[in-house]
Amino acid sequence: MKMLPLSVKNLTRKPGRTAALTLLTAFLALSVFGGSVVVLSLRAGLQSLEARLGADIILVPSEAQSKVSFQNMFLQGTTGAFYMDSSVQEKAMEVPGVEKVAPQTFLASLKADCCSIKIQVIGIDPARDFTVQPWIARSLTGELGDMDVAVGCKVEAEIGEIIRIYEQRCKVVARLEATGTGLDTAVYCNMNTMNTLLAAAEAKGISHKIASGDDSVISAVYVKVKDGVDIDRVNSALTGHLRKVTAVRTRSMITGVSDSLAGISRTVTVMIVVIWVLALIILLLVYLMIVRERAREFAVLRLVGASRSMLSRMALLESALCGLTGGIAGVALAAIGIFSFSALIESSLGLPYLTPAFSTMLALAAGAVLLSAAVSALASAFAARRLSRVNPGTALREGN
Amino acid sequence: MKLIADNISKTFFRDTASSNYFYAVSPLSLELSPGTVTVLMGRSGSGKTTLLNLLSGLLEPTEGKVFLDDTDLYSLNDGELSRLRNEKIGVIPQARSVVDTLTVMENILLPAALYGKPEAAEEVRQWMDTFEIAHLAGAMPRELSGGELRRVAIIRAIVQHPVFLFADEPTGDLDDENTEKVLSALRACAHEQHMAVLIVTHENDAVKYADRLLKMEKGQLSPKTN
């Protein structure tokens, strides 16, 4: 049975009807694919953020909260710096329940050669670090040497390139995987390099001195709590034990993000459901209208020997082809929109945003296309049944 | 091969004071054999088209059976009956009966295309020449007049090479010249291609082409006498 050529002719020679049906299903695919990608990107961003923070508690100078929102430094790549005595890490280790600590030192660059904007430079201690180091290790096999830097994926510098920070020449030895957070715009170096950069910044009049006058400064201490120990209790103990230091649970930082993400997920899901319900109702109405319009055509087909099942198959095939075409168009439009405006989406949402892997996107796209084709065919099922049962004699006479 | 209607009737719902149904076709028996032209005459509403639909497998009788040789048409499932209609029965309906999204040529070849049978394009062209619509092969139905559309339906039924050809008012939209051509062609189908042709009409022109004349009145069938 050759219903496909007949269906294709029916679709191509009724361009208005076909375009309307295709557009509706394109809208369905666009909403489900686009919505899913945005929600998945936000979830992946949150997971990435959790993995990158990698600590249970972060210690920052008490002044940090008034000076700069350190949450924004992590989530949106805001540059900024605050300093405290490096002895905080040893004092933190004295608190029962603390398993390990890792210091980090921040420095906001002026304008590096690599970038048209200020970038955040983060110094880590490779020997003690347990948060950034595993991430760097995926892109760099050796050590992060002196005057070597690893750059986030959004920093415009290639491996082997020399970038200048406060007139200091730093060699890019690794480009890091995307995290979907502000960390993607940062540059990482070891503490020796950071001390050199701090001295160079000092020479430019950007002081990092603290009240104690100690040159050995850090910006934050990442604390890992021993397994089975109550993190809140350790958090309280750290707050009590350390003066002029604020202990922040990383989960509380992420909770805000997580809540926002849940809200956005709900909104997107509701929007998708509303769009689908409306589009389904419109599709059903359109197909019911088509029953009347096509009764004569199906009567002729019955007259020349088409069986009911052939006619049902033909109607379902046509709607599935519309759905398939619409689905592909919808997914393509959504993909173009999402990839073209991902930076805008990310900045307007103000949340960690990490586009899913290509294989996941491909699976989502295939799912959206198949779903659109199936829904389109399903919406036409009733119409197909009615059309296949048309009585040729009656239909031809009524349409006469 | 014979088509035998055995005591068939068709009633339709119609709520009147005396009854809630009426006989469109009263119980009747009829036999159609290949090689003959049967002309069925009668006034509008006499039940001619209903009888044609009953005989062509398009409308199941309320009572009685229609046999094609030993096969009871209406005992077949829809797929079997549809295939049989495609292979053995050609119908030229009274109404406009083309698929609007197909060209004239595609409409004529539709019965063969449905079941993937070889297309008799050359034969179609000859018939189109005969009926003076060869220049319309690639045209869409909306570009054709009523008479041209009628000739398309006639060619479609003829090139289907059925054993039984049912024509419902086949000359309704045609001028005298084309009426002659169509009726001659239908007679040739019966006599040369050994088809059983049943022409339903209320026009007297068809009488001279008939091997057998029948009359229908108020659902009752009788041999026509002048």
Image (cartoon, rainbow, N blue to C red):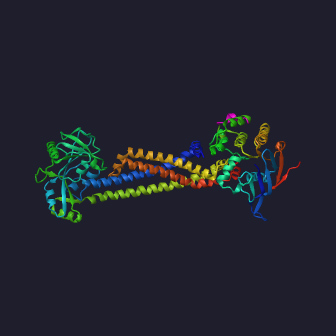
Which secondary structure dominates the residues rendered in magenta?
loop
Residue B110 is a magenta residue: no
> Who is closer to the viewer here, B98 or A287?
B98
The relative height of residue B138 versus residue A325 in the rendered view (above or below) is: above
Residue A321 point in image, percent of width and height: 53, 47
Judge from the rendering whether residue A3 lies leftward or rightward of residue A371; answer left or right.
right
> Who is closer to the viewer here, A83 or A353?
A353
Evaluate whether residue A282 shows in this view: no
> Who is closer to the viewer here, A385 or B143?
A385
Residue B148 point in image, percent of width and height: 71, 39
Judge from the rendering whether residue B6 lies leftward or rightward of residue A243; answer left or right.
right
Residue A292 point in image, percent of width and height: 63, 51
State the residue at coordinates (34%, 51%): A353
Which of the 4 image quadrants contains residue A259? bottom left
The relative height of residue A41 versus residue B161 in the rendered view (above or below) is: below
Evaluate whether residue A266 shows in this view: yes
* Extreme residue toward the left, this view: A213
Judge from the rendering whether residue A129 lies leftward or rightward of residue B152; answer left or right.
left
Q: Which residues are magenta?
A: B131-138
Judge from the rendering whether residue A66 lies leftward or rightward of residue B111; answer left or right.
left
> Who is closer to the viewer here, A88 or B22?
B22
Residue A301 point in image, percent of width and height: 65, 48
Q: How many marks?
A: 0
